[in-house]
């Protein structure tokens, strides 16, 4: 029997270990060990010619499979019972982090620029937290920040590339090992296991390097005055 492309990966995500799916394990780690509020993403569905489409009803969805739909973002929780119920019913659903508040925020940029920025920050001796990667974009998790703090920080920059995105209060981010329309979500730099939640840098320690990397690499986006 010929294997349908992508089927093996989906089966691996659904494989149960001790009665729990891989995605449920990931969601419970975020919610109960790290106290990060999560909820299931809408996921994807196959289309014509092997194409993958978002399972939401919007044909021009900007984040295929990688966003909440039902339940909505406000339902994100750290309650283990709710997390188990969600992923028992939808074992391959993406794990979506509701950013901001007491949860981590994130800054994302195109993959090429992200790799360059992470390398440059490493050369500078900047301690980074977890880094999430897809084939097209990388996201650096940072400590929670408020919109006024972010506005003041960006105002101090001469320009901000259009490709740089900020996931703060009211935002969201797909976490590993989710499968989305952008491809497999993975840890480029995984959280370190410990008694407390993963360490996170402050946003101001990484923004300047991310701005420079976004402007100086192919696909980094246009230079827009802030």
Image (spheres, helix red, strand yellow):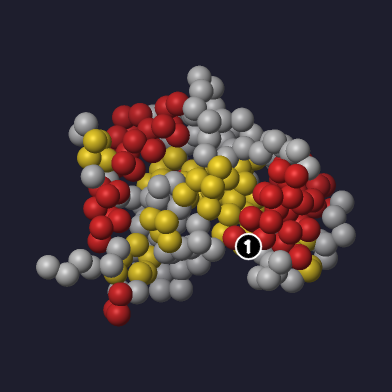
Query: Can see residue 89?
Result: no
Q: Nearer the viewer, residue 43 or 79?
A: 43
Residue 178: horizontal and vertical position, in percent? 40, 50
Lateral position of residue 133 relative to residue 163, left or right: left
Q: Residue 2, percent across and down? A: 17, 70
Q: Looking at the picture, how far across and down is residue 72, in whole percent? A: 42, 49
Residue 107: percent from left, percent from top: 65, 50
The residue at the point 50 percent across, 19 percent down is 195
Residue at x 66%, y 39% (from the top left corner): 128
The C terminus - image quarter: bottom right
- Considering only vertical position in the picture, is 46 above or below 131? below
Name, please, the residue furthest toward the front.
123
Residue that mark 1 sits on: 112
Q: Nearer the viewer, residue 64 or 189?
A: 189
- Numbered-mark total: 1
State left or right for residue 175 relative to residue 86.
right
Instruction: Place residue 199 in its image quadrant.
Output: top right
Residue under the point 74% across and 38% down: 126
- Residue 31 sits above or below residue 169 on the image: above
Q: Secondary structure at mark 1?
A: helix
The N terminus, quarter of image: bottom left
Indicate whether 70 appears above or below 159. above
Does residue 174 appear anywhere in the picture?
Answer: yes
Nearer-the-camera pick, 133 or 30: 133
């Amino acid at each position: 029997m010929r294997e349908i492309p992508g089927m093996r990966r989906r089966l691996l995500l659904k494989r149960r270990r001790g009665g729990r799916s891989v995605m449920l394990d990931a969601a419970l780690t975020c919610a109960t060990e790290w106290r990060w509020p999560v909820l299931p993403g809408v996921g994807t569905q196959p289309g014509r010619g092997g194409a993958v489409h978002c399972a939401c009803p919007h044909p021009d969805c900007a984040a295929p499979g990688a966003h909440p739909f039902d339940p909505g973002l406000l339902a994100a929780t750290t309650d283990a019972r709710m997390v188990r119920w969600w992923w028992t019913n939808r074992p391959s659903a993406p794990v979506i982090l509701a950013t901001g508040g007491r949860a981590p925020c994130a800054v994302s940029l195109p993959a090429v620029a992200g790799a360059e920025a992470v390398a440059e920050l490493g050369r500078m001796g900047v301690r980074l937290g977890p880094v999430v990667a897809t084939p097209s974009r990388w996201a650096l998790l940072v400590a929670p920040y408020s919109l006024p703090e972010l506005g003041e920080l960006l105002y101090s920059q001469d320009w901000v590339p259009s490709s740089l995105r900020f996931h703060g209060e009211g935002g969201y981010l797909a976490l590993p090992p989710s499968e989305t329309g952008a491809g497999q979500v993975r840890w480029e730099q995984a959280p370190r296991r410990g008694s407390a939640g993963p360490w996170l840098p402050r946003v101001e320690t990484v923004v300047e390097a991310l701005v420079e990397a976004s402007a100086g690499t192919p696909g980094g986006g246009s230079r827009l005055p802030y």
